[in-house]
Amino acid sequence: MAGLTLSRVGVFGGTFDPPHMAHLALAEEALHQLNLSQVLWMITPNPPHKRGVEITPFVLRLEMLKEALKDYARFEISTLEAELPPPQYAVETVRLLREKLPDSELFYLMGEDSLRDLPLWHQPAKLVSLLDGIGVLRRPEVVLDWEILETSLPGLREKVFFFNAPLLQIASHEIRQRISSGQPYRYMVPEGVARIIEQYHLYQFPGN
C-alpha cells in the first residue's frame, strides 16, 4: 500500500479462491461507474462466514490474485487482513484503512445480496459510519426492503451507490467443483491463474 494517496478508493474484499473473470468485470465496472481512483483488492485469510470450510492456503490465493491483476494499473492488492488476528471483520479492516488513508474516500464494494444482509454483519452501523459510500452491484433476483434496512441502519440509503456489471454466471465454488469433476473451466479464469491451478494441482478433489 506504499504511496497509495488517492481520492476515492474502492475496497473489494473476498477469499478469491480462485479469482475469476466475474471478479475482474465487477471491479472494472465499479472503477468506471463509481469514478474510483483505484480498487483495493482485500484478500481475506480466514473469513468468519466460512468457518469449517476448506480454503486454499493464503499464499497460493495471493499468488493467483497477483497473476490475475498484473496487467491492471488501477487494481492493487492489500494483505492488511493477514496482519489481523482472526476472525477478520470488514468493520475492523475499514477502520484501519481509514487511519492509513485519512484523505481518501472509502467505498466498500458488495453485491445487492450482501446489502440485503448487511444488518447481520458484525457491527454494521459502525461499518456504515466509517464509509463514504457503498458500491452495490445490482442483482435482478434480489429484492431490497429499504424500510427494514433503514430501520436497522439509519442513513444507509444515502451512502449506497448502485452500479451494473455483466452478469457472468461464474462463481469460485463452481470453478472448484468443475475442476474436481474434470469439467472445463479454462476461460472462466485469467491465463496466469489457470497456470497456477495446474502447477499446484489445486481443487483436484471433491469437497474443495
Image (spheres, helix red, strand yellow):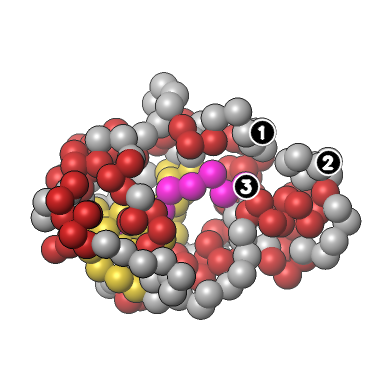
* Closer-to-camera residue (3/62): 62
The part of the chain drawn in magenta is 10-17
- Disc 1 crowd rating (10 Å Cα; few below 14, some 14-19, many 20+) is few
Q: Amino acid at mark 2?
A: Phe
The quarter holding residue 170 reads bottom right
- Whichever of callouts 1 and 2 sits on the residue coming sooner in the sequence is 1
**Could one spot residue 96 in this view of the protein?**
no
- Of badges 1 and 3, the one in the foreground is 1
Q: Are marks 2 and 3 in contact (CB under 8 Å)?
A: no
Residue bearing mark 3: 17
Is disc 1 in contact with disc 3, using a CB cutoff of under 8 Å? no
Please name the residue shown 85% across and 61% down the image: 183
Instruction: Measure the C-alpha gap from mark 1 to mark 3.
Output: 10 Å
**Going by the picture, which residue comes out furthest to the top?**
85
Coordinates of residue 95 in the picture (x, y in percent): 23, 37
Task: Inspect this view and state whether residue 122 appears.
Answer: yes
Please give the label number shown on residue 22.
Answer: none
Dominant secondary structure (helix, strand or loop) of the stretch shown in magenta: strand
Residue matched to label 2: 205
